[in-house]
Amino acid sequence: MSELTELHKTVVTTPNDTEIRTERVFDAPPELVFECFTDSDTLAEWLSPDRLEMRIEEYDCRPGGKWKYIHSDPSTGSEYVFFGEFLEIEKPERLVQTFNFVMEPQPPASIDRTDFIPVEGGRTRLVTLTTFEEQQYRDGMLQAGMEKGLNEGYNKLDEVLASRS
């Protein structure tokens, strides 16, 4: 695996009251990074915080297709259910989907727009803009530890990409 540099750091910003923007560079071309986001078997290898296990219940990767996965904590038996719908798929440039999780009261879904941007050296700049209905939902996501879990997942994605390059 390549040495971690500032390029590989996930940068999380809040461009306005209802959005979270994340950006990270991966040492692989957009086609391969896109595949890691859209192939359910590969997604299950990396998309979870370190302490949780992941299983995919549904993954119909096409516009209008639904997805659902569950993170479980083996130490407590707790489960966290996430679900959504694919809205737009432009291989390998863009993936747009709704994102939600099961909780009471049920919050409205956010919209994730992920762009896979080619950069020098066969790398990919991954930029995700997550838009929420209201600031309280954006702030709740940030307070729930989103950034830590995202970084842990992206570190695993670096390993998956290195093994396939």
Image (cartoon, grey):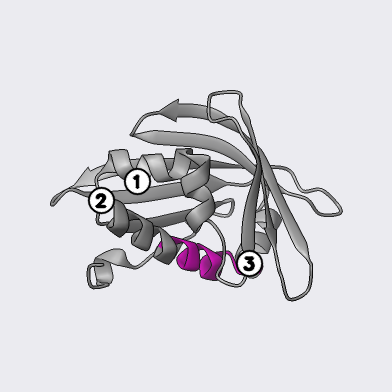
Residue at 51% of width from left, 45% of height from top?
Answer: 41
Residue drawn where x is 45% and y is 35% of the image: 95
User: What secondary structure is marked by label 1?
Assistant: helix
For the record, the magenta segment spans: 144-154
Q: Is residue 31 left or right of residue 141?
A: left
Q: Which residue is mark 1?
A: 33
Give the label on residue 28, or none.
Answer: 2
Q: Is residue 115 visible?
A: no
Q: Quick one: label 2, few (<14), some, or many (20+) residues within 10 Å?
A: many
Q: Secondary structure at mark 2?
A: loop
Residue ranking furthest to the bottom: 75
Residue at coordinates 59% horizontally, 51% vertically from top-left?
Answer: 18
For label 3, the residue is 52
Is residue 146 in the magenta section?
A: yes
**CA separation in Å, label 2 and label 1:** 7 Å
Residue 11 picture location, percent across and down? 39, 64
Q: Amino acid type of disc 1?
A: Val
**Pointer 1 local density, CA inside 10 Å: few below 14, some 14–19, many at least 20:** many
Can you give x and y, in whole percent of width and height, for residue 66 in the image? 65, 31
- The image quadrant of residue 94 is top left
Residues at discs 2 and 1 in contact (Cβ within 8 Å): yes
Q: Nearer the viewer, residue 2 or 99?
A: 2
Q: Earlier in the sequence, mark 2 or mark 1?
A: 2
Q: CA distance from mark 2 to mark 3?
A: 26 Å
Q: Position of residue 150 (x, y in %)?
A: 50, 62
